[in-house]
Amino acid sequence: MLVPLALVSTDLLGVVLTLLALWAWQRGRPWLAGALLGWALLVRPFPLLVLLALVLVAVRDGRPLRAAQAVVGAALAALVLLVPLVAVQPRALTAAEQWWSQGAGYGALQMLPRLVGFPLLTTASTWVAVGGWVAAVALAVLLSRRTRLGAVQLAAASTAVVALTAPSLSVQSGMWLLPLLVLSVRPWWEHLVWAAAETLHFVATWLHIAFDSDPGRGLPPLAYAVVVLLRALAWAWLLWRIADERAPFRTPPPGGSPPAARSAPVPAAGRPRPAA
């Protein structure tokens, strides 16, 4: 599944940077974690949800300095690349500016009204997306205060809200689920659900695009709407499964073992027997 997705965008680079950032955070390197997330943010906005989750977990655990280091590291790293890029190519921020004026695009639930003949207004689409981000941040803050969920679980919950309200959820967006699935140690068959949903949507999208030029060989709007809906349901279910994980993602202290490893019971065979 990664092969066709990697061929149509640079999202795989952002996914790798996000995975490395979570590894750096687990190793007690908040500056490096923030910097890697800052660079990943230049690819897609999803790493912002991961950064938010790391900050909320650090603040909840009484480590505000780690949270501040991650945020400052992300901002500085993004500026180090963004400022020279804008200086050389002033139109580098065009994509970010167009976000406010784009209508519903491929893969998003917002596209369903258009597929059935009642397209959303561009203004309405933008406000739905903005409302989704606000709701995602509020949900992450609420969960961090009322539960002991880890960073991966908080990121999954907020990603679900943003994805389901996004104006566009392209075929390559599916790669951003992969680090959350891997780090939450989900069963293998749930990975197959992800792969099946993304493969079906990948093929259906290109067939729907071909429908405009050759209706006899393309996928009609109503059929594509069903595929988009199935993919959205798969995203919602998978992210809910990750966020509902009872074993939260925890960061072991530098040089130490995870709490679970230290508190594991001694096997019966290795317990000392009382003296006779």
Image (tube, grey):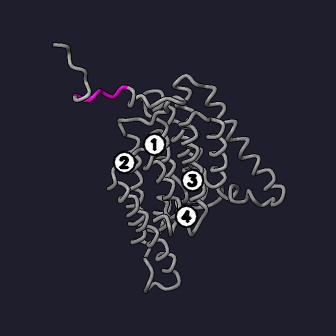
Picture coordinates of residue 187, whole percent (x, y): 33, 50
Residue position for label 2:
186
| Label 3 – label 2 distance at C-alpha | 19 Å
Asked if disc 4 and disc 1 are in contact, CB closer than 8 Å, the reply is: no
Query: Which residue reaches farthest right?
Result: 87
- Chain-order first, disc 4 or disc 2: 4
Label 2: element kind: loop
Asked if disc 4 and disc 2 are in contact, CB closer than 8 Å, the reply is: no
Q: Which residues are magenta?
A: 263-268
- Chain-order first, disc 3 or disc 2: 3
Residue at position x 66%, y 45% from top?
38
Q: Which mark lies nearer to you, 4 or 2?
A: 2
Residue position for label 1:
157
Q: Which mark lies nearer to you, 1 or 2?
A: 2
Residue position for label 4:
105
| Label 4 – label 2 distance at C-alpha | 30 Å
In the depicted structure, whether residue 149 falls above or below residue 104:
above
Picture coordinates of residue 83, whole percent (x, y): 80, 50
